[in-house]
Image (tube, rainbow, N blue to C red):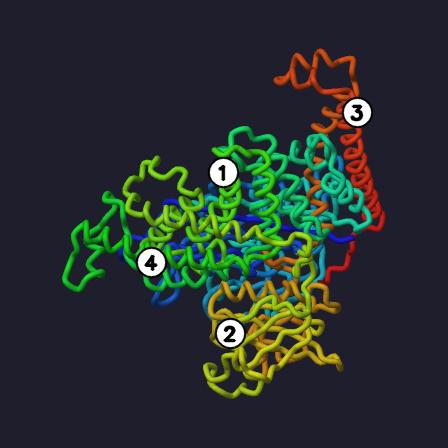
Amino acid sequence: MARNTSLYFRVVEGRNLPAKDVSGSSDPYCIVKVDNEIVARTATVWRNLNPFWGEEYTLHLPMGFHNLAFYVMDEDTIGHDDVIGKISLCREYISSHPKGIDSWINLTRVDPDEEVQGEIYLELHVVDNQQRRMLHCHVLEARLLRRLAFHTGTRCWSLTWTWRQTRCQSRLKCLLSVWRSGTGTWWGRMTSWVGSRSPWTPYRNSRPPKAGFVCCRLAMLRKTLGHGWRCACGYRGKLGALRLTVRLCEDRILPSMYYQPLVELLADSIVSPTEEESITPLAMLEEVSSVESRQEVAMKLVKIFLGQGLAVPFLDYVNMREVTRTTDPNTLFRSNSLASKSMEQFMKVVGMPYLHGVLKPVINQIFEEKRYIELDPCKIDLNRSRKISFKGSLSEDQVRESSLELLKGYLSDIMDAIIGSVDQCPPVMRVAFKQLHKRVEDQFPEPANEDVKYVAISGYLFLRFFAPAILTPKLFNLRDHHADTRTSRSLLLLAKTVQSIGNLGLQLGHGKEQWMAPLHPFILQSISRVRDFLDQLIDVDSENVSEAQPRTLFHPSVTIKEGYLHKRKAEGMGLVTRFTFRKRYFWLSSETLSYSKSPDWQVRSSIPIQRICAVERVDENAFQQAHMMQIMTKDNEGQLHTMYIQCKNVNELNQWLSAIRKASIYNERMLPSCHPGAFRNGRWTCCLQSDRAVRGCSRTHSAVTLGDWSDPLDPDAEAQMVYRQLLLGRDKLRKTYLEFSDPGTAPEREERSCDISAKQERSPSFQDRRMAAAARLLDVIQDLERAHQAFERREREEGPNHSHHP
């Protein structure tokens, strides 16, 4: 049994940000930290005080976390980036919103002297007597407690605790300890009124500034002994706002045997289909799941059935349900049903390498050329057109003519890449499209609906896959940054045209954007090519296609990630920093991390993945270099070795950290702590200790990984999420079960129903089968609930681990 903590967040947009540049604008981006570790960086939105990012991330945090922080920065080409503000959310606050947080949140000011990182280990509990309530606090240890000021040098710390009573603001101060490195241990007890605690730092001849605070809720302390590491936080003030979506999922993952009945019950829906498609457990799952959770449910089901080798039958089942319930072919797959969401997630999980291979060359070309393209007469800016011609500004007609030729050129490249990609498309995707084509053709056989079977496929492939990737390449990992204003407009025009081609021109000329008319001939010429492409795409032998995906478990021969990085020479300690790094090409698989001088170089050096015991960031002041990570390994003799690697930007650093951590997450004897600095000039740059073998001064984050399409399948975690959704909908399931099991109330039920005639036509055998299916599903839910309760009781009986060391 294991605990699984997943943190989903989406940085949507900002509003009313302050201008940081002399031009009266800002170039904002967001840095996201979990317990002071940078886990994500959004792209920069240039010259915008109300930026839109729309970037979403999922973090896997098996070890849990204390604090989630969003820093809004202004990117500067010269000098350091300016800090605009931040939002800090503690774990308790996020947990108090089980349905998630989706709102505007005010930014707070950031003072470098008040930014704190580090943790303090406390044991807290509340004692009630007849006279008053007492808080007993046992302060045990601190680690990496330091302010994030932009300076280096010896840090000498003393810690003063201030207890604040909520009403009278009385204080009790206690000087506990003095130590140099920001890490220390002391013993002692204090008793006071319930309040908050504030550590202070000493300054000569002046009042010591507050370094931060630690807070706990009284209700939490009264329920249980509040012992554990507490994250030190900075102080706040208001500035600007961000719109955020944050959702925390903390689950107890049971052993696989407990989920097997649920997985088998869901699989029976597609392996042994019934005559009535609405009485299967899968159909009931769709009924009880909310619209907001449907995308997540679809993703989990896709991964479950990929692991079972039943993804294509699953998609065929949900598509068949959608097709048979649709009477108007113009509305087919237009809603956010389980079928449409499942196909979307299936294409992302299986087809992302295919998407990158098709679109990336053209997208890169568009970003590099940055051409001015505009067809809308209301938006043409003749001043911007000066760069098109050396002879001065062009007329409006000349701009439109130039834009039309550029668009046709890019569109030709895009369509040639798509139409010529039949062999690149994963066979399992082709089989899924083939079955979808057949279902639609059988449902709408009329000659007037000849194009419906093509639109059903192109609606997914073009409208939900290729066109969104063209519109926002950053969200599909095609680019590291969002497009600037000029390139973004070009991508929008290209995406609109690709959508029209994917619709096979059915809505051509009916929209309000008549200025797109010059592209209509190109769209009409492409339609026949798309039909031929789709015919070739579904011309596949479905019997010989295996659904086994390499990402079910990383196969040793599969390269998880590769690319150029800069490796630090181990023997270059005495050299100038810039001469100690060498460019090397790295490959990561589930077995080895290899590197050589170039991709074609015959000689490679390799590190076995099983020897990796920590993968962490490195402080910038260690080598005066940004975006660095360290990979710590242990040889056969137990000796530790550290490899320092520099990435080109923070996004690349996060991707490599996450990929290596995923590959090594099940390694034994992972290090609980490490040094974020380097051992130089006889001491560690982070904690100033002179003993090279001293225990690390920072907790490792090896379990923190970014979720993406390349994640290995985890059937137990996927099944747990499905169980959670069924548990939320259990009352609705019971109502359905009791409704069909109590014939005496049937007239009353039919009076309340909006579909009386349909219920009257149903036979008793249908009611019996539906009642039996609901009963089976409820039994499985109840068994899983009992298993969770049994594990909870066992945990309470065993009691918490009182050891305060990491």
Circle 4 packing at 10 Å, graded few (<14), some (14-19), many (20+), is: few
Amino acid type at image mark 4: Gly
Which one is nearer the viewer's eye here, 394 or 687?
A: 394
Ranked by sequence position, the earlier of labels 1 and 2 is: 1
For the question of whether residue 565 can be seen, the reply is: yes
User: x and y percent of residue 436 in the render?
Assistant: 59, 43
Residue projecting furthest to the left:
391
Give the residue number, with chain letter if any, for mark 4.
409
User: x and y percent of residue 473 in the render?
Assistant: 45, 55
Amino acid type at image mark 1: Glu
State left or right for residue 614 relative to residue 677. right
User: x and y percent of residue 653 in the render?
Assistant: 53, 66
Amino acid type at image mark 3: Asp
* Mark 3–mark 4 distance (CA, rounded to whole Å): 62 Å
Give the residue number, with chain letter if any, for mark 2.
564
Ranked by sequence position, the earlier of labels 2 and 4 is: 4
Residue depth check, mark 4 versus mark 1: number of the one nearer the observer: 1
What residue is shown at x 78% (from left), y 46% (from top)?
A: 259
Ranked by sequence position, the earlier of labels 4 and 1 is: 4
Give the residue number, with chain letter if any, for mark 3.
768
For the question of whether residue 236 can be seen, the reply is: no
